[in-house]
Image (cartoon, grey):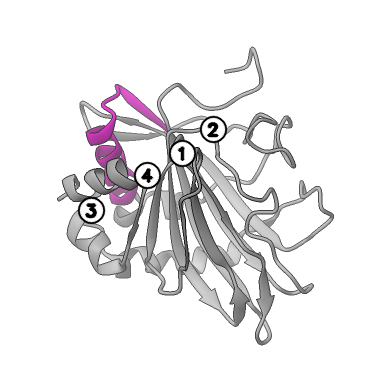
Amino acid sequence: MMTAPIAKAILDCGYVLLEPAQVQAQLDVHSADLLELRGSWEDLCKDTYLRDGGSYRSRRHSCFVYTSATQMLELAAHRAHWQPLDYNALHGGMERWFEPITQSVQQTAAWQQLLKALGATFDAICPVERWYIEAHQFRIDTASGIGRPTPEGAHRDGVDYVAILLVERRHIRGGETRVFQAEGPQGVRFTMVQPGTLLLLDDARVIHETTPIQPAAQHGLRDTLVLTYRQHGFQAPPGLG
């Protein structure tokens, strides 16, 4: 792996956007292998917690622990996804239980390599004993019209680093990703189009959002894998860490 260029870019800018070829060259993760998992996005469960009344989001969620010294990745006990209101004004403050990511996905070499490679990359920036990882498979669809990848708006996640992998984009308009300095006016806007594109964010330094998607034809959707890395344990309600 050649994680140093990625680490430097994140240190310099607070984010880095990697094309599939760069993901392969610098993380030793082959996009073709990752994209073989696309079929598992057909088996996600509807997110029943959306407070805007929508039914456009499906997801699965699992947690992992990466130990830096041994580069070992372990599955953590299944738990609720929880964020404080400070970071998610729309859905924060409540425990959200989602079906876990299937073992057939978790056990693939590409999945294991991606989570480990990102752990090593972030460890090069901020050396820690362990990274606590939350993995989310998301599908945003346009079956009912507009789909919102980030219904909470521009936000931070309350973690150290965030990785967003585009898995599929089909028959949609919109879905522009926006990354802005948390403290300052600077920002960038782009649309992730090619499956296998990977966006890495320093959550303390930048805020991010993705604009709503609209159908360009039937069966419009946007599939992503979102991974968050946090050094101080999983986020949990006070007293339940």
Give the residue drawn at x 77%, y 50%. 50
User: Residues under labels 1 and 3: Cα distance?
Assistant: 20 Å
Q: Nearer the viewer, mark 4 or mark 1?
A: 4
User: Which corner quadrant of the image does residue 241 belong to?
Assistant: top right
Badge 3: how crowded within 10 Å, few (<14), some, or many (20+)? many
- Asked if marks 1 and 2 touch (Cβ < 8 Å), the reply is yes
Q: Position of residue 35 (x, y in %)?
A: 39, 68
Label number found at residue 203: 1
Q: Is residue 35 above or below residue 96?
A: below
Q: Nearer the viewer, mark 4 or mark 2?
A: 4
| In magenta segment, residue 125 | yes
Q: Nearer the viewer, mark 1 or mark 3?
A: 1
Residue receiving disc 4: 14
* Label 3: element kind: helix
Mark 4 or mark 1: which comes first in sequence? Answer: 4
Badge 2: how crowded within 10 Å, few (<14), some, or many (20+)? some
Judge left or right: residue 120 versus residue 161. left
Circle 4: residue type: Gly
- Asked if marks 4 and 2 touch (Cβ < 8 Å), the reply is no
Give the residue drawn at x 71%, y 52%. 47
User: Residues under labels 1 and 2: Cα distance?
Assistant: 7 Å
User: Residues under labels 4 and 1: Cα distance?
Assistant: 8 Å
Residue receiving disc 3: 27
Q: Position of residue 222 (x, y in %)?
A: 57, 69
- Asked if marks 1 and 3 touch (Cβ < 8 Å), the reply is no
Region in magenta:
112-133
* Label 1: element kind: loop
User: Residues under labels 4 and 2: Cα distance?
Assistant: 15 Å
Mark 2 or mark 3: which comes first in sequence? Answer: 3
Mark 1 or mark 3: which comes first in sequence? Answer: 3
Circle 1: residue type: Asp
